[in-house]
Image: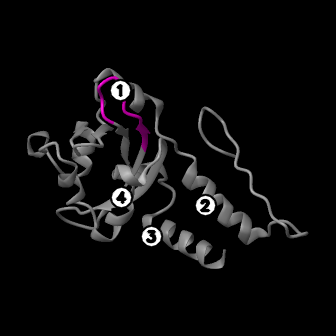
């Protein structure tokens, strides 16, 4: 089943006469779990109205200027007065290995209009990196506004508290290795 208030469906087909075995179903469950958290509609409404919620952001694709809610800044370990409005400042706090996938979400030439989702890690002053989930939507340019990426960033560990970060990565790696 697909989560969310709007419902939904994940359709997967196979040509194998026996259908999907238990390992296949486990892998499909991981994929379904990864794709069923769309950008919250309130993030898009927030970007349109100009009232930024704590977990919301808007990124102007032509300039790289970002408006970021205080909750997101806390997740990155920044105080509001420390943030200069540049997306590069936030990218600089990202685990280097996660930068290519995060850049693919934030660079306009790699995007088409629509929804984006990604989990990535940010460096912490002490302890291990923190997993965050970005859910966003690219809005087209219009009415004198540039194309914008709008969405939310949340602590990924609070979205799935029953699975540790290491276990989630290991399960996904194992599922992909046998797919």
Q: Whole-percent x and y of residue 177? A: 60, 78
For the image shown, how many numbered marks are present on the structure?
4
Out of 5 and 49, give the one closest to the viewer: 49
Mark linked to residue 166: 3
Left or right: 2, with 121 as reference point: right
Sooner in the amino-acid sequence: mark 1 or mark 3 = 1
Q: In the image as oriented, which residue stretches furthest toward the right?
A: 17
Work out whether 168 lies above or below 113.
Answer: below
From the image, tell me which residue sits under label 1.
46
Alpha carbon separation for disc pair 1 and 3: 34 Å
Q: Whole-percent x and y of residue 1? A: 70, 46
Q: Whole-percent x and y of residue 24? A: 73, 68
At mark 4, the secondary structure is helix
Q: In the image as oriented, which residue stretches furthest toward the left?
A: 81
Q: Nearer the viewer, mark 2 or mark 3?
A: 2
Out of 158 and 116, give the one closest to the viewer: 116
Residue at horizontal 27 percent and vertical 69 percent from the top: 96
């Amino acid at each position: 089943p697909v989560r969310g208030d709007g419902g939904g469906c994940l359709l997967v087909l196979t040509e194998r006469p026996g259908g999907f075995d238990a390992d296949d179903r486990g892998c499909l469950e991981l994929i379904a779990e990864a794709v069923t958290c769309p950008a919250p509609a309130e993030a898009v409404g927030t970007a349109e109205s100009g009232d930024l919620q704590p977990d919301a952001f808007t990124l102007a694709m032509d300039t790289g200027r970002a408006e970021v809610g205080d909750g997101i800044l806390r997740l990155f370990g920044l105080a509001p007065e420390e943030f200069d409005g540049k997306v590069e400042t936030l990218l600089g706090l990202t685990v280097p290995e996660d930068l290519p996938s995060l850049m693919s979400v934030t660079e306009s030439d790699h995007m088409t209009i629509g929804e984006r989702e990604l989990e990535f890690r940010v460096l912490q002053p002490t302890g291990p990196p923190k997993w965050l989930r970005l859910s966003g939507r690219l809005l087209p340019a219009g009415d004198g506004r540039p194309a914008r990426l709008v969405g939310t960033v949340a602590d990924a560990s609070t979205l799935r508290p029953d699975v540790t970060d290491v276990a989630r990565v290991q399960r996904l790696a194992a599922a992909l290795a046998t797919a």
